Image: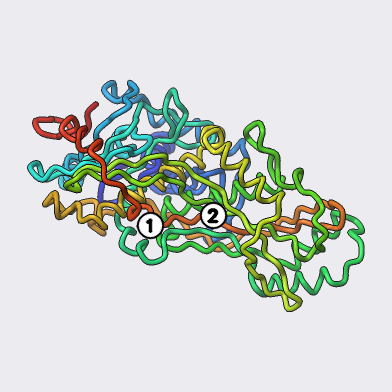
């Protein structure tokens, strides 16, 4: 069995399917194995055919990761060594993909993983070569025990061709409302919750009360905007949001030292149980981009991710209101989460994948906003071709409510909402003029280069 560029199943599914094909020897079994792996490969979550999101056991993820690692094999020697400034030619990348399409050849792993890029620091345009070159740190890779492909030494997730394609194809739409994912209670569930908590005077049996709250609130809805909900890119947004809330609500242990759960930080604020709906969301935190004088050289600076927070309150009719204010405990938890984000990106690689997606979204917005394809006189005919399909799994729609009750004074925490919000055009619009990126542009020129990537 071969997966070709026309059916561009990235994110390691290609390697996993090949391994399964060799093991079981049937097309159907191999395809089922690949879909099964895809559903479990991102942030330890699975999505069934009905769109229901669930956690996957660590043992299941570990077993799949081991099979993936065996199928993936080694890294090409010219990629294996760390490079602080690896260059990736988009024109050259497309040439390889075009060859795979025309000759019905498998996609090389180095293409699937963008030559091991782990961040994008510079974007250079070369009108004379009709090319756009991405530059950033890169190294060889391995499979993390949690299923992601990460740097062999650094442990940071590598960037994926699949996510680059989704970012480019979604860039124009992202100019309007950005790219976002949130996990939110339904209006009906909130109304039932408000009616239920109005009857409570004490917590009673905590397990019984939590179960009643879960039943009243019902399944929560997954809302994805700006990117295809069935894409790997969307699944990264969802998984990062899911993991953040699970850590905050003490549904799973924190993977790094110094980041307690919000539940353990909570202090009394004097408000009742029905008002305790903390809200957190993640968004990019970048310094202004540096722009060369002629608009052919760009630098992404200070790239990081921050957590923001506010409180939601329930009115008597069950309507939820965003207050724009944050409790001191929720604010402090968001600050610690932000401070620990680099550590989190290593311990829980989906947070690193989220940062990679943010980089790619900003680069894609920059390419369209600043007309870089027109400046290069090259319009990415393969990457933007809708006939070249990216990986797709079931679109997430809902997940079960898990109530976590902890009494602090007169307060009760029921659930958390929020999500991930990326506004790449706003970041691409925040620029400063500088000569520094332009000084480096000649060093990254693709002129006379035989390969599509180089150090």
Quarter of the rendering occupied by the N terminus = top left
Report the disc number at residue 47: 2
Q: CA distance from mark 1 to mark 2?
A: 32 Å
Percent coordinates x, y for residue 69 in the rendering:
44, 30
Residues packed near mark 1 inside 10 Å, few (<14), some (14 to 19) or many (20 plus): some
Q: Residue at x 18, y 44 (%)?
A: 125
Asked if 76 appears above or below 3 in the picture, the reply is above
Instruction: Label 1, secondary structure: give it.
Output: helix
Image marks 1 and 2: residues in contact by CB distance under 8 Å: no
Q: Residue at x 13, y 30 (%)?
A: 449
Q: Is residue 90 visible?
A: no
**Which of marks 2 and 1 precedes in the sequence?**
2
Using residue 216 as the reference point, say whether residue 229 is left or right of it: left
Percent coordinates x, y for residue 247 in the rendering:
66, 44
Percent coordinates x, y for residue 29 in the rendering:
44, 45
Q: Report which quarter residue 278 is drawn in.
A: bottom right
Q: Which residue is mark 1?
A: 426
């Amino acid at each position: 069995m071969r997966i070709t560029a026309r059916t561009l199943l990235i994110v390691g599914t290609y390697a996993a399917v090949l391994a399964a094909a060799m093991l079981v020897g049937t097309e159907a079994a191999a395809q089922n194995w690949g879909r099964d792996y895809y559903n479990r490969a991102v942030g330890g979550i699975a999505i069934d055919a009905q769109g229901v999101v669930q956690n996957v056991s660590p043992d299941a993820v570990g077993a799949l990761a081991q099979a993936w690692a065996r199928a993936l094999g080694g890294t090409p020697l010219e990629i294996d060594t760390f490079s602080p400034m690896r260059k990736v030619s988009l024109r050259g990348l497309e040439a390889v993909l075009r060859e795979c399409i025309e000759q019905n050849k498998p996609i090389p792993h180095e293409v699937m993983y963008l030559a091991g890029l782990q961040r994008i620091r510079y974007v250079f345009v070369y009108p004379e070569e009709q090319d756009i070159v991405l530059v950033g740190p890169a190294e060889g890779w391995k499979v993390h025990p949690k299923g992601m492909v990460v740097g062999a030494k650094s442990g940071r997730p590598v960037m994926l061709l699949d996510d680059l394609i989704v970012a480019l194809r979604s860039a124009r739409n992202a100019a309007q409302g950005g790219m976002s994912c949130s996990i939110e209670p339904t209006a009906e569930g909130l109304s039932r919750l408000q009616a239920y908590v109005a009857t409570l005077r004490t917590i009673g049996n905590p397990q019984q009360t939590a179960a009643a709250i879960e039943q009243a609130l019902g399944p929560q809805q997954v809302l994805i905007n700006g990117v295809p909900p069935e894409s790997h890119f969307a699944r990264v947004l969802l998984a990062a949001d899911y993991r953040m809330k699970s850590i905050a609500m003490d549904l799973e242990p924190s993977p790094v030292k110094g980041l307690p759960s919000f539940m353990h930080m909570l202090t009394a604020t004097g408000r009742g149980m029905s008002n305790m709906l903390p809200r957190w969301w993640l968004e990019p935190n970048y310094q202004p981009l540096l722009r060369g004088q002629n608009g052919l050289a760009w630098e992404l600076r200070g790239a990081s991710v921050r957590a923001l927070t506010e409180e939601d309150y329930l009115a008597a009719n069950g309507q939820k209101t965003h207050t724009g204010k944050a409790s001191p405990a929720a604010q402090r938890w968001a600050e610690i989460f932000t401070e620990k984000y680099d550590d989190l990106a290593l311990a829980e690689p989906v947070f690193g994948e989220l940062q990679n997606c943010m980089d790619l979204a900003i680069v894609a917005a920059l390419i369209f906003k600043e007309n870089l394809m027109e400046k290069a006189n090259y319009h990415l005919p393969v990457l933007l071709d809708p006939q070249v399909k990216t990986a797709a799994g079931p679109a997430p729609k809902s997940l079960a409510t898990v109530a976590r009750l902890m009494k602090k004074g007169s307060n009760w925490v029921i659930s958390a909402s929020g999500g991930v919000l990326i506004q790449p055009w706003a970041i691409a619009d925040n620029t400063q003029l500088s000569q520094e990126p332009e000084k480096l542009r000649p060093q990254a020129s693709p002129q006379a280069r035989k390969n599509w990537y180089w150090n």
